Structures are given as structure tokens and as C-alpha cells.
Amino acid sequence: MRGTKMLRQIQFWLLAALASVLMAGCGEEYVVLNPKGPVGQTQYDLIMISIILCSIIVVPVIVLTIFIVFRYRDKPGNKAPYKPEWAHNAKMEVVWWAIPIIIVGLLSYYTVRDTYALKESPNKEAEPLVVQVTSLDWKWLFTYPEQGIATVNHLEIPVGVPVKFQISADAPMNSFWVPELGGQVYAMAGMTTELYLQADEPGEYDGRGANFTGEGFAHMEFKVVAKPQEEFEAWVKEVKGTTPALTKEGYEELQKPGLADVMTFSSFPEGLFEEIVSKYSHGHPIKTSDASSQSETQKASAAEEALSTQELHQAHAQ
Amino acid sequence: MWESLKEFASTFFVTGDPLIYGSDVAIVLTLAAIVFVLTKYKKWGWLWREWLTTVDHKKIGIMYLISALLMLFRGGVDALLMRAQLAFPNLEFLDSNHYNEIFTTHGTIMILFMAMPLLFALFNWVVPLQIGARDVAFPFLNAVSFWLFFFGALLFNISFVIGGSPDAGWLSYPPLSEEPFSMGPGQNFWIWGIQISGIGSLMTGINFIVTILKMRAPGMTLMKMPMFTWSVLSSCIMIIIAFPVLTVTIALLYLDRFLGAHFFTLDGGGNPMMYINLIWMWGHPEVYIVVVPAFGIYSDVVATFSRKKLFGYASMVAAVMSIAIVSYFTWGHHFFTMGTGAGVIAFFAVATMLIAIPTGVKVFNWMFTMFRGRISFKLPMLWTIAFIPCFVIGGATGVMLSMAPADYQYHNSYFLIGHFHQTLIGGVVFGYLAGMYYWWPKLFGFKLNEKLGQWAFWFWNIGFYVCFMPQYALGFMGMTRRYYTYGWDYGWETLNLVSTIGAFLMGIGFLFQVWQILYSIKNMEKEKDTTGDPWDGRTLEWSIPSPAPFYNFAVIPKVKDVDDWWRIKQEKANGTYKEEPVVLEPIHMPKNSGIPFVMAVFWFIAGFGFVWEWSWMAIIGMIGVFACMWARSFVYNDEYYVSVDEVRRIEASYGRVY
């Protein structure tokens, strides 16, 4: 039948197209498949494991489907066996309950292993650099608490050193994503999420917001510049020496909805990030030891201690 | 006075966009044409008696189908507008706000106002016929469900010319969907459109569970139910557990917006993340609610067109029912990136992967139903065969997404977009189209043209792969969903253009289907189904004439096998069939009622009042709703009997003599 032949041809081309799309993944623009640091590498490895394990089912199923559809087509003179009542075979059914169970078991093992691994710093030897990330409408504010500087829509990090991002928002929820370095995590007002990334090669990497925040969302892009430690320190020094300070008023201006260019600031109000987080944690029992009394000092210290959602969770659980 | 009127009109009507003005004109012209035709041919009475007041599950099914196809058109146009905007970098065809409205309505319409009514169309067409029943358990409630859906959808749809469309995404995550980030009535339209139709969906779920459990023909034990009916049962169990969550969640969201409550707000102790949890407790079962019945359709179609019994029936039953249970434990995989502890993430990741096991088993069973069968490539079977490779790839990418650490890279990227369109189109839409082609002759008495259907099939399928395969690659390139524009810097332009071309190919496929339906209606004599069994079917619906008489079965059958009609045909062929003496009896049927329609109109009025926060209007509407319930409570005479002579006369008109 003409229809079958066409179907086969079409399927062939579709598979060929799929394969070429996957193979084209070697190109530099496939940022997820060209990781530049250990976190992205772990995720890349997991992606490859999953593609291989899934192919064990997908490829034979497609090939077998094409074969069956062709062989058992309704055509006069088709000599293939026809058994209209054959509808049960315990052995075969056990086999195809077992195959997906085994594959899912394997995938689960790798998933759980890496889930726990990525909660920790990828590089235990080096002390991580802390960067605080705030998602605003519609720009990113980065504050470096140890260096005392701040930037907008631009991030510089040293190569080979893990970076511990503490992420929050002073706007609707966003997601902080630098695909070449590793996966994303949400930026949520009133709490802090934590993400470790590390760049192993110097370079410029694209970062963006990955969760829709409204009108200016598509423009929340930033560059991450990874450079050797000395150059990074030189950059910090330069920022400290040559750029204006971010004031309270400056921040309030920045927080208003709108787009922003790249900015650098030699300093920022102390505890700005903690203040942003605690601004929305009003009413949340962050510190449960004495939740009923809500003096100002307690609230502030509570906010400081709420710097990871895990802690927040434990607090909720108690 | 004049000034304030002008000001009101400028917020009430959406202005300033040529696309909108075009739509305004189109809407007015269409309405005028409908009124003109109805008046000219004196069809107002016919419309009221035969359609607006009907409680016949088949007619309700047809109305669901028409609504769903209209919504498929609207959602499809939305999709093409988006793809047009993304065809090249830095295009200024749509601005950010307009684009945000369009992707929000596209998603909402496709899931809630296209997939759900198409699903309910098939429930209504098929379930009573397959189980040997004369209607659903609660025919009046069934009509209420339909009209609530209809007016909910209408309320949602008018938002683009009146008041402005919602633009916070199809699930309206707060705080973005809260004030001050989303002012104006747009979000309220989203809430109330879904709220009103959602109540209808919940009642449909209840109705069909009772129908399946209580109304089966004698002899049809649970394990003799056709596979589609099993899948509907599974789907309805999910509906009655999931939809109340939706109702409560968006009611709380509305309280935030209307009364200034603080359930999900940023400040005042609100917790937006709680909304995200709740909405996905509905949202994830929802995707299984729509896909599991498609599995049922494939099962029935693959057996019929392979002329062979469904392989592994018991396995299939176990698979659909286990999906119904496990579907409640996977919602967390929609936000692995929320930063919860590793234990929570691992739980949801593994629970999600477990779904792949029963689904994989089903695929093998479909393949081995075809194995040693005789496959004919009629339209329903073409869509089923196309479904298998498509869904296997979509399922595999779903498993890839469920691996949480890798998901940190896929989340909210075009990889995700590729995945869920592949499962929702390749799984759900292909399945519903297979079902529509398969059961169409039973409802309308003629088949749809094969040739035009094949054109549609190839355009849809080729278009599908051209559109969505590049999106996986774009995901690997780091392209995020909901971008209304992008630059030249990332190498995204080529694949985006390819994807847009694919989307338009699918659009052409849809046009072929419209042509196919119109052509087949015009030439219905040519493809007339005179036997009631055009596909050499296996289950009870094919034992009655086409189009099915309003009472379905002149005599309620006694069932002995899963494929009972196939058994009877086999026995007749080899001479072992024992004719049982048939005694026609008067048939007990429900009376039509206008109350469901009127009640839904009041819901619409109330909804419109809530949307604009005009309390007086909402109150009037709600009073009307309760008045309708009150009126219905005193209708004692809501049933009648069809006489034996009448039944005999109708059956004789089909050439069946009793």
C-alpha cells in the first residue's frame, strides 16, 4: 500500500532530522551541552546518561513499530501470520514490565545521587566566593558582601573558585540561570535560595532570567565574565576606586519597574540584601524560638539566619 | 457625563490595536450573520428545543465538539501569532504586553477550553454507547456541565475585546498575577472563566463515574468494560480529586485581588509558593486527565483496525488505574528549581519516573496488538500509528526532565516547551482526532472524507516535527520560554524560523480538516454509514444503527465478552449464535430542560460582575443561579416514556425489524 511506504519514508526522515539535531549539539551555541564548569559538567553527564538509557527503549520501539506496521498491513496475499485471538502472553508481558522498571531504577539512582551532590560546593578545597543575587523588575542586582561592591546586569567571577550564589527577589519570582556554568534556581521574594556554580575556563557566559516576570522579562540578560583570580581582584579594586556608591535612594530608584543598563557600584548599604529578604518575611515564623514577640532586632537577626531555604524549611517543620 | 462615559468606554473596550479592531469587526459580522440566518429560516425554536435545552448526551457531545474546534482555531491563531513574532530576531510585530497576553490565552485555551471540551465530547459520544446505556446517570447535570463550560469559555474569550486579556502565564503564578503587578480585569477574566467552566468539569467527572459504575448493561463486569471506558473512569477519578483543588486555589487568588486578602501576596504574610504547589496539585493530574482517555482511544482503535483483540487487557487496566494514583505524587516536579531540600526533590523525581513504567507497558501492548494482526490504514489508525513514535519520544524527554539535576538546565527552556507539546499534541490531540474520526459515523451517520483527511494528517504530522524538534535544540541553546523577542547573539534565529514554518504547516493541516468536515457534510450521501458498523468494530456502540437513535439501544444488550459485538459477529458467521427472543418495552427517558442554559447565563452575569468587581451585578447573577436551583428542585415531572410503537417505527426507519 502506498500509504505505508510513505509512512516509512517519512519516519526515516524524521529520525534522521532528530539525529542531526542531537549531533549538531557539538556546536558552541548549544550552551547546555558545552559546560564550562563542574556543575554544568555533572548535569551534562546526567543528560547523556539519560539519553543513552532512554534510547534503549525509544530506538527499538520505533524500529519495531515500523516493522510491525509494514509486515502486518492488510494487503491481499500478505503471508504473515494472522491470529485475531492472540492477546495474552505472561512471559512477554513480564518482560515489558521489567524493562522500564530496570531503566527507571537506573535513572533514579543517578538522579538521587546527583541531586544530593549538587546541593554542596563542587570544590571543597577552595573557599567559595559569595555573591548575593536580587531579581528586580526587570534587572539583576549582584552584591558582593566580602568585596563590598555591587553590579547590575553584569557579573564577574574568578576562575576555578566555587561561587556560592544567595538568591532572592524584590519583585515577582524569577529564576537565575547561567546555562554554560550550570542549572538554575528560583529567585523568590522573602527567602533565599542557594546555588553553587564554578567556571573552569576564563570567558564570557550568558546569563538570564528563566521565569516569566512580566513586561521587561525578555530583557533580563546579563554577562558573566570569568577571569583569573588576580584579574578578578584587580577588577574589584578598579570598581572600588572609580565607580559611585549605591545608596539607599539609589536602590529604591533601581527597584522601580523598568529596564537598566550595566552598572557598577563601589559600595552598597550594609545589609542591603538581608533587608530585601526580611522585607517580605514579615509574619513568617522564620525563627521559631520566640515567634510571638516580634521586636525589630529579632526580626533582623531572624532574617539573617534565614539565608537558606533549608533552614526555612526546618523552621516551618518545628 | 459625556467625559466619564468616554473614560469608561476606553477602559471597558480594548483599543489601540489594529488586530483587535479587526476582531471586533469579525465578531459583530459573525453575530449578525448568525442572527440573520436563524431568523430568516425561522430556526430560533429549533435551536431552543433541539439544542439549548437538550439533555441528550450525544447532542451535548456535538456541542462540546463544535466549541472545542472553535477554541482550537482561536488557540491555534494565538500560536501562529507567537511563532510569527519569533520567526526572526528583534521583530516588532507584537510588543511585549501583547505577546504576554497571547501566550497566556494560548495555554489557557488549549488546555481548558480546547482539550477539556474535546475530551468531554468524546466522553459524551461514546461512554453510554459503549456500556449499553440510554444516557448518562444524570442527564440534567450533564447539560449544566456543558453550559457552565460554554459560558466560562465565553467569559474568558471576550476578554480580548472587553477589558483586556490576562498576561501572567496560563497558570497565573502570583505575585505576578496579584495587584499591583497585574492591575485591571484581565486576571479576573482568567479566574472566572476557569472557575465557572471548572465547576462544570467537576460535575462531568462525577457524572461519568456514576454512569460507568451504575449504568453498565447486564453482564458487563468491570473487567469486561471496553478500554476507552476504563480510561474515562481513570480520568474521572482524577477529575473529582484534582478539580476541587483548582476551584479553591483560584478562589483564594480572587479573594486576594478583590478583598485584599493575603493568601498569595508578596507581603502581609502571603505565600506565593503555596499557590504554585496548589495549582500543580491540580495541574499535573490535569495533564493525565486529558491524556489517559487518549490512551483508551488508541486501545480501541488499534484493536479494531488490526482486526485483533487488544493485547494485554489486564495489564492495560492496571496501567491506567495506577497512573490515576501515581499522578497525585508528581506535582513537585514542576518546580525542582524552587530550592527545596534534596530529599523532597528526589521523592518527586522518582515518583515522576514511575509513571514511565505503566506508560511504557501500554506502548508495548499496542505494538503487540498490531503484531499478528491485519492493519488497515484508515484515518483513526493513521493517527494512532503516528502517535506511537511521537509519544515515545515525548515520554523519553519527559523522563529526561524528571531527572532533577538535569531539569535545572531544562526548566522553563524550549526543551520543556518541546516536551509538553509533544505529549499534548502527539498524545492528546492525535488521540482525540483519532477518536473523532473513529466515532464520527456513529454520531452523524456518515464518514469523513479519507483523502482530505490524509492531507490534513500529513500536514499536521510533518508540521509537528518541523515545529517542535528544533525547540528541543533551542532549549539546549539556553532559549527561555515566554521571551517575546531575542537578539542575534545566541544563534537562535535559524531554528526559530524552522519552528515557525512547522507551526504554519500544522495550521494548513487544520484548514484541511475544516475543508474535510465541510466537504463531507456536503457529500454525506456518498459516505453514508448504512450498517451502523462502518469499521467492522468490536464493542457495543457498533451494534446499533448510525446515527444512533436518541434512546441509543432499542433493547439493552446482555454482555458476555469485552469485545461483545465482535463475539456476536463471529458467532453469527460460524452459526453458533443463539437468537434470544426480543421483547420491546417502553423506554424511559429524561425530559429536556431549559434550566441548565438559563442557570449558566446567570453564572455568566455573576462572573462578569466579579470580573469588573461590580458587586451589584455579581449579586444579581448569583441570585439567578440559586433561583434556577430552587426552580429545579420543584420539577417532579422530568421523565417520560417512549412507546413501543414509536421505538418500532424508528428502528424500522433504520431497516431494523423487531
Image (cartoon, rainbow, N blue to C red):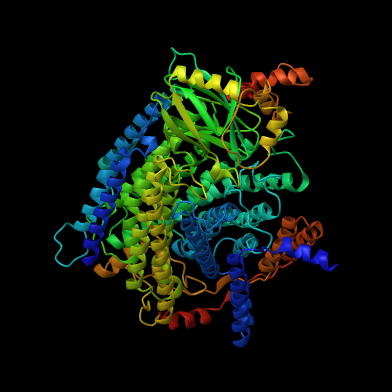
Is B324 situated above or below B644? above
**Is residue B583 rendered to the left or right of residue A33?**
right
Kindly give the residue lying farthest to the front in the view shown: A242
Task: From the top left corner, tell me how far across and down residue A74 is, in percent.
Answer: 22, 64
Q: Which residue sits at x=66%, y=30%?
A: A190
Front residue of A244/A125: it is A244
**Is residue B305 rendered to the left or right of residue B440?**
left
Q: Is residue A124 visible?
A: yes
Is A58 situated above or below B217? above
Which image quadrant for residue A240? top right
Kindly give the residue lying farthest to the right in the view shown: B1
Front residue of B240/B103: it is B103
Is A314 situated above or below B517? above
Q: Which residue sits at x=49%, y=46%?
A: B481
Task: From the top left corner, tell me how far across and down residue B256 is, in percent.
Answer: 73, 44
Which image quadrant for residue A83? bottom left
Q: Is residue B537 visible?
A: no
Task: From the top left corner, tell me how far across and down residue B508 is, in percent.
Answer: 40, 66
Q: Which residue sits at x=54%, y=74%?
A: B586
Task: From the top left corner, tell me how far across and down residue B14 is, in percent.
Answer: 67, 62
